[in-house]
Image: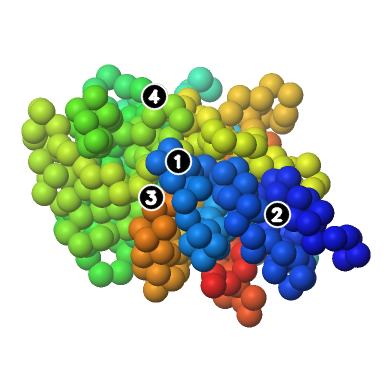
Amino acid sequence: MESLPVELRQIILSELDPFSFQNTISTSRTWNEISRDTVVLRRQLNKLPLENRSRADLQVHGLELLINAQQQAVSDLLLDAEIEVRPRGGSHDMLESKIAISSDQLKVVTLEDRLLTLYSIQQHQNRRIYRVLARRRLNDIRSPTKSGPVLRNAPSCVFELALAKDSNMVAVALDRSIQIYDMTRGDEPPLATYVAAAGGHFITGLDFQCHDAALRLRLNKMGTVLYLGNTHQVEAAGSAEFMDWKDCKGLEVTMLDSTSVRILGSSREDTTNPAGLRLLNRVGRGWKFVAQRSAMSYCIGWISDDAISQSRRDPRGVEAEMVLDLSCTNSSVDGMTAEGVAYWAEHPSGGAQTYPHFCLSPDRTLLVVTEETDDPSCEGGLTSRVFAWRILLPEGVDRERRSADKEANLKVNRVPIYIGEMAGRVLACCCQQRRTQGGTRYEISLTTSTASVEFLVRTRAVR
């Protein structure tokens, strides 16, 4: 290839898909220098998910601005990502009918025959080692001493479990009733409530969030989410514990109802109700969140504390701002790697029936979305597919990229790359990151009802 004429190599670069193009120009300085041609860069940028106005203005920009736009696209679309899959142990070797894992994947709780069992998890030579930490009987209609709304227990009952990350709290839900247990204090009665805000629907999933200070409830009404907890409790320093929930009666407080939230668009017709809303982190006097905006897009939004407080009592609903639109598909071209992996041909479904799970990298630059879809051919009848969006560049670099983008008038819509998939229902998903000499390595740990793996996503340093 090095003996080919420059003109021929430029033709080859022009025909490559965006992922192969980036891999090729990274192999040597010669290929990189050859790629710095206005014709080559315009053809490559035209294959990216540019905004319509940017596509129309593409032909008027000079070489320097085209180079800046291409480098921006590499970072925004993770075109330089290298993906590796590592197994983290086999399927769970416990026969319990219900299981929940903490978000850091260091603890697991099971429910079998009215008995809650809490385990610690240690990884040793690709094997899991479980150690029993505590056991408690379920507070149901067969309990000799009942406290609060009790749970009925029958073979047909479908329980939902959640395990706190920084404490030994376990939440159990059935229909519209919820109980929270302190597994380390067996003599402490569980907190219990009947969720009237569910409005006739029942709970199909729950998990602890906001430093264990809030419970996120997923209802069987597609896309509807409730947050239980106390806003003052959420803002408290450190992580919430059982006594915090007891003192502020957090289970009795509906912090947020997603059906009352409206995401403002460019017009009244573009205003939507979010589905599958999940709070991410505090920003100013409010919360940043991620949600499904339509059948073909997710979004990052922001809702103020005042709006959250009003959502509980204002029948007209409250407004939230859209910070970043995250399209599920690239309408211009399907990106194919040399190995045939279609990073852009595979895209999120974006429907409420996919029950998405979200996790954010510690530096808040990478958003990971895991969607569950029905698949009768695999174990458990479900397949969990993993996608990732770059939602923010490292501090400082993001400001420079936005400035260059404004000057060049070339804007790239952010679409996700396909990371991989696993059989089974999602139990836990978390994302860690490590700075390396050449860039950043994201470690996405995914545990499903059938197995546990780690996806390593390596990206080069942003220039």
Pointer 4 local density, CA inside 10 Å: few below 14, some 14–19, many at least 20? some
Q: Position of residue 181 (x, y in %)?
A: 37, 49
Amino acid type indicated by mark 2: Phe
Give the colour scheme of this rendering: rainbow
Please identify the quadrant where the C terminus is shown.
bottom right
Residue at 14 percent of width and 32 percent of height: 317
Q: Secondary structure at mark 3?
A: strand
Label 2 sits on residue: 21
> Which circle marks residue 56 in the picture?
1
| First-in-chain label (4 vs 2) | 2
Q: Nearer the viewer, residue 326 or 369?
A: 326
Label 3 sits on residue: 208
Residue at 63 percent of width and 80 percent of height: 437
The reply, left or right, for residue 312 in relation to residue 15 is left
User: Can you see residue 408?
Assistant: yes
Q: Nearer the viewer, mark 1 or mark 4?
A: 1
Label 4 sits on residue: 222
Alpha carbons under labels 4 and 2: distance apart: 41 Å
Q: Nearer the viewer, mark 4 or mark 3?
A: 4
The reply, left or right, for residue 349 in relation to residue 459 is left
Alpha carbons under labels 4 and 3: distance apart: 20 Å
Pointer 3 local density, CA inside 10 Å: few below 14, some 14–19, many at least 20? many
Alpha carbons under labels 2 and 1: distance apart: 22 Å
Quarter of the view holding residue 80? bottom right
417 vs 4: above or below: above
> Which circle marks residue 337 in the picture?
none
Q: Position of residue 328 (x, y in %)?
A: 50, 37
Amino acid type indicated by mark 4: Met
